[in-house]
Image: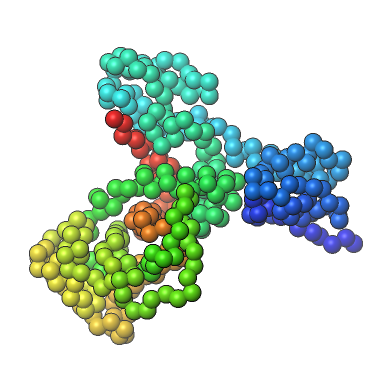
Amino acid sequence: MPNHLSIKIFIDNESVLCFGLATFSPGSLSINSEEVYMPNQREASYRKLFFLLKNSDNDLEKEILSKIKKDYEMFHEHNILNFESLIHNVDECPYCKSNKTTLYGHDKSGIKRYMCKSCNRTYNLLTNSLFSSSKINIKAWYTFLECLLSGTSMKSACIAAKVSIPTGTAWLHKIFIALKNYQNSIILNNKVYIDETYIHVDKSKIKYLDEIGKIRKVPKMPRGLSKNKICILLATDTHKSFAEVCCFGLPQKEPNLIICKKHIKNNSLIIGDEDNSLTLSAHELDLKRIQYKSNTIEAYENLEPIDQLCNRLKFFIDKHRGFVQDYLPDYLNLFIFIDNMKSENIDLYKTTTKLLEILFNYKVKTS
């Protein structure tokens, strides 16, 4: 009885697909010990893999490659027409904001075009959006977003959505832009649990590239709460949460006050450990305080909501470790969006749809 082999496709030296019967390597395609040449170059892609399909005489090889090609094409079809309902205010002109618009045919992709009677300019559903002049496959976007929202890394999300790392980086940029002001409307009240957590930063190990998050590791990390650590202030009322960058090193009163003014309602009760950096905020906002000594049984029992929030943030950051420091606020916005959706018991599909709806309806400012 023959051994059951596994198939693994490597595109740009990255494993992207796994299922039964055969094995692919970066420079070759191996089926039943027969080698088929495949260029081992950085630009190697699915299209080069499909080139093998035209020249193959092996029925098993043809069947496998045909299934891969069909699956790939499903993730790269321009199918925005099936999801027009996600886009709001289609009757409003994106240029002059007038509602005096009329349907003006369709473009070559089948997307509806409109004409504004006020400024005589034409537009479609995607004009001035994050998806303007780009091909959209909703299935690929859903897969990419579901992976991110369920806690995987961007690299794993790219593999699942069958897109390249540069494409996934561009998509992540769009998510960051759409969620830029997400936390601005978050206000906590009544019983608020609050604490700080820290993330290492060492500028000597950061290598700025076009892609998000490329880090050159260094052998040693600074110890203690030095200025090589970024302080992040987190708080939750068990329904909603926020997380914002406070400062470098030990928490400071003035930055904490600015953040608390934005997100905590006056006369609320804040619960946390013994922290002098929150005294100014408590005084200015008339906040009542309950404090517990750190690393005690009493603190563990009473500060569980904020401790769990800090742990979830560290887990999230660890999945995306290696990002450039400038993107930290954007990652915090994404984390808080995910965490708040889970707090409201919204399932993954609805959360993904909501984020996709936010992306579609974000309008890029034009001069």
Image: 107 above or below 62: above
Q: Nearer the viewer, residue 278 or 324?
A: 324
Q: Residue at x 55, y 41 (%)?
A: 139
The answer to whether 42 appears left or right of 101 in the picture is right
Q: Position of residue 15 (x, y in %)?
A: 65, 55
Position of 203 compared to 187: left or right? right
Quadrant hosting residue 357: top left
Residue 325 is situated, as x and y percent measured from the top left of the image, at: 38, 59
Q: List x then y, in percent, for residue 334.
A: 38, 54
The residue positioned farthest toward the bottom in the image shown: 296
Colouring rule applied to residues:
rainbow
The mark total stands at: 0
- Quadrant (top left, top right, bottom left, bottom right) of the N terminus: bottom right
In the rendered view, would you say 179 is above or below 51?
A: below
Farthest residue, direction front: 204
Residue pictured at 51% horizontal, 35% vertical:
136
The one nearer the camera, 333 or 102, is: 333
Query: 266 or 212, which lies in front?
Result: 212
Query: Residue visible at 18% across and 75% down?
Result: 276
User: In this picture, is 100 found above or below 256?
Assistant: above
Image coordinates of residue 147 in percent, x first then y, are 51, 53
| Quarter holding residue 224 | bottom left
Q: Can you say which quadrant of the picture contains the C terminus? A: top left
Query: Which residue is at the far right?
Result: 1
Residue drawn at point x = 31 percent, y = 76 percent: 225
251 lies left or right of 155: left
The answer to whether residue 283 shows anywhere in this view is yes
